[in-house]
Each structure stands twice: as structure tokens, then as C-alpha cells.
Image (cartoon, rainbow, N blue to C red):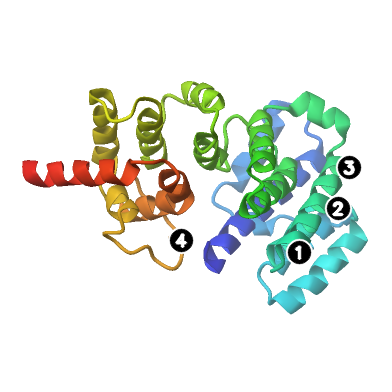
Amino acid sequence: MSKKKNIDKINTEKGLSKLMDEIEKRDFKTQEELNDFVNNLMGQSLDNLPERTDNKGRSQDLVFEAYEQTITKGKKLVMQALELDPNNADAYNYLANIEKDLDKAIIKYERAIKAGEKSLGKKFFEEEKGYFWSLIETRPYMRAKAGLADCLYAKNEVDKAIDIYEELLELNPSDNQGIRYLLSTLLLGKDDLIKFELFIKNNDDENCAVWNYNNALYSFKKLGKTAKTEKILLKAFNSNEFVIEYLLGLKKMPDELPEYIGRGDENEAVSYVYGSWQIWDNTEGTYDWLYEFKQNRLKIN
């Protein structure tokens, strides 16, 4: 993600965080009072809201500011944030994000998770499970969990990563973080496909490269080359024709992942192949199958 795009997201969340704190501080007695307050803010920047003065709010604002600074200054701001609020999960997330050593990043994400658990409290998890992310205060914890899972996946500790991704989906079935796409691929890479089968049944309304090509590979792994498998692959091809070209090496993968993805475009194909090529590579006969399919499409056209 580009620095500008990341800062835009951070600023949006900073504004929402200040807004929720202001609403809580004002302690509106009726829904009408709340509506009037929100309506009066329409068209205004949330930056115009009063600066937070409590330690927890000031701490979080320092972390938001850190992302807009150089790493050297960002670190200093984050350390100040932790002095104000030792349970600021996002402060540890920042330190993990800039850490180049994978094992050290894991330690910092684990600290972020513990800090998030202390900050939210056990009762909060029991009462709000299923609504995380929609509650602004849960996002640092959710980011920490996802960051840890990503690191474990990078270390090829796939089972541990899968467990965490599944926990995230239990906390937030709406999946604002897009966890389900990588999880689908990781489950498909397992020898036992039962969990993958259950997973796709619960998400049968998806229609994107990840889902369509994973379903095609699943069918090939289960049935081999059959009329049914060919039909599923054709659906995947129609949804994004570029995936096969990248999988076969007919197109060279770029050095960096794309910032933006559109349904059916090359960026979607690159993103999918980057995360899934290993399971295609580990499944015998897939490339011959794809090549033959590609040749047949050329003849038709």
C-alpha cells in the first residue's frame, strides 16, 4: 500500500475515533440529540472536533501522527504514546510494521494483541463477538491479529496462520479486512480439503478471481480433468483471463504487488497468482491442463 493511501485511511480512522469519543463524552440522552449533533457536522471536517485530552485518546492520536512522519520521528512519537497508554495496541502495530526482522515483528504483534486484550477486556469480547471492526476501538486489535497471521504465513507456519484468520472471521463475519480470500487459498493448499469445502459453501455468493480459480483447482484436485472441471475453469477464465497467462509464465509477474485491484483486470490476476502459485505448482498436472485449455481457447477465437 502506498504511503499516501495508508495515510488517507489513517486520517479517516482518526476522524472516526475522535467522533466516537466526542459522542461518548457528550452523553446524549435521546436519539434526537445525537442525530442533531451528527447533522450539524455534515460537510465539516472531523479534524475540527476538539483535540482529545485524555491519556488514551492522546496516545492514539500520537500513533496516527507517527504514520505521517519519518521512521525516526515516528518511533519517538510511538514511545510517547506508550508512556501515555501502555495498552495502546496500535503503537506496537506501528513498531511491528516497520520491523524488518520477521521474528521481531512477530514479538511486537504478540505484544499488540495482549495490549488489545487488556484494553478491551474479557467481557467486551464475550458481548461484542461478531461485531468487531464496526466498533472503532477493536481495529487496533484486529490489525494486530492479521499482522501476526501474515508473519506466520510468511514463515510457512500455515496452520497457525489459518487458526488466526479463522478467529478474525468469527470476531467479524463481515470481513472488512478481506481475510477470506487468503484463507480460501490456504485451506485449498491442505491435503485434507474438508475445511475448504465447508468454507466455500458458507461463501457461495463470491465471484472473483480468487474464488473462481480456487474452485477450478479444487475440482481438478478432486476429479481430475472432467467436463465439470472444464466448465468451472471456463467460468474462472471468463471472470479473469489474465490469471492463466501469469500462472503459465506467459506474462512476467511485476516486482511489486498492485495498490489497487479491479474485478477482471491484470492487477487482480497478479494479486491472485502471487498468493496462490504454490498450490498450483504443488498439484500435479495443473500446468498441462491450463496450457491445453489456453490452446483450445485460441483455436475457438
Residue 282: which numbered mark, if any? none
Q: Earlier in the sequence, mark 1 or mark 3?
A: 1
290 lies left or right of 78: left
Among the two numbered marks 4 and 1 on one chain, the one whose residue lies closer to the N terminus: 1
Label 2 secondary element:
helix
Crowdedness near tag 3: few (<14), some (14–19) or many (≥20) residues, C-alpha within 10 Å: some
Which part of the image, by quadrant, shows the C terminus?
A: top left
- Percent across and percent down for residue 106 are 75, 55
Q: Few, some or many C-alpha atoms within 10 Å of disc 4 (few <14, some 14-19, many ≥20)? A: some
Q: CA distance from mark 4 to mark 1?
A: 22 Å
| Sequence-first disc among 4 and 3 | 3
Q: Name the mark nearer the viewer: 4 or 3.
A: 4
- 238 or 125, which is in the foreground? 238
In the rendered view, does 230 fall on the left or right side of 62? left
Question: Mark 1 highlights which residue?
Answer: 95
Could you tell which of marks 2 and 3 lies nearer the N-terminus? 2
Helix, strand or loop under label 4: loop
* Residue 257, label in figure: 4
Q: Identify which amino acid the numbered label 4 is placed on.
A: Leu
Camera-near label (2 vs 3) is 3
Q: Quadrant of residue 191?
A: top right
Q: Position of residue 120 (x, y in %)?
A: 84, 39
| Front residue of this view, candidates 275 and 204 | 275
Amino acid type shown at disc 1: Leu
Q: What residue would you read off at disc 2?
A: 56
Pointer 1 or 2: first along the chain = 2
> Residue flagged by tag 3: what amino acid is it?
Lys
Q: Residue at x 87, y 31 (%)?
A: 122
